[in-house]
Image (spheres, helix red, strand yellow):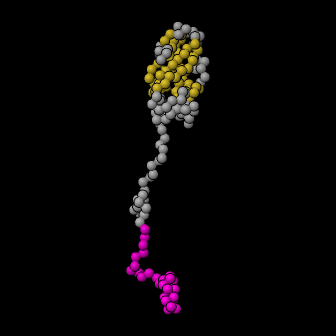
Amino acid sequence: MLAGLLLLAAACQPASREPEATQALFVPPPPPTATPTPAGTPSEPKQQATQACQDNLSFVSDVTIPDGSEVEANSTMDKRWEVENSGGCNWDEHYRLRLISGDSLGAEEEQMLFPARSGTRLILRIVFQAPVEPGTYRSAWQAYNPDGQAFGDPVFIDFVVP
């Protein structure tokens, strides 16, 4: 019985010998999602999770006060344009419409651009005051994104005070 215990004790002890030079060590394969890249070859950049959208505004039509209209001196003008959010970004409260040339005609020089989802049409509206002096007038406006970058077609009011 003592001989059996000695054999059992010897069998449980770890082997202390080195592996032979010809014996290959086990190397696990790479995970299935990894693709090995040969040395010296740049790896492909990872695709961005989200790509930046592009802002755009397309003019569709003048809804009120067609270009060249005659308006009474010092009258209030309710100008409306139909436009489309033709870009990939949804407009929120941080988008603006700003005066880019001409007189503001009594309107604030920066207006909130109506929030709109990409691909939708909407009506932009600004209330202007016609000058007292006769003449031809034009006020041009441009959309701006939250980063302050202008985009899309400008919209304008173009009229004559006789």
Residue for point 47% across, 43% down: 51
Viewer-side residue, 2 vs 51? 2
The quarter of the picture where residue 19 lies is: bottom left
Q: Where is 159 relative to 9, above or below?
A: above
Viewer-side residue, 162 vs 17? 17
- Is any atom of residue 100 visible in this view? no
Viewer-side residue, 27 vs 105? 27
Per the picture, the main secondary structure of the magenta-coloured stretch is loop
Residue 68, position in %: x, y?
Answer: 47, 13
The quarter of the picture where residue 147 lies is: top right
Residue for point 42% across, 82% down: 20
Residue for point 56% across, 29% down: 96
- Figure disc tally: 0
Residue 62, position in %: x, y?
Answer: 47, 18
Q: Where is 70 relative to 32, above or below?
A: above
Q: Is residue 109 magenta?
A: no
Residue for point 48% across, 44% down: 50
Q: Which residues are magenta?
A: 1-28
The quarter of the picture where residue 60 lies is: top left
- Is any atom of residue 158 visible in this view? yes
Q: Where is 145 relative to 104, above or below?
A: below
Residue that lies at the very extreme toward the front in this rendered image? 1
Residue 32, position in %: x, y?
Answer: 41, 60
Residue 148, position in %: x, y?
Answer: 56, 34
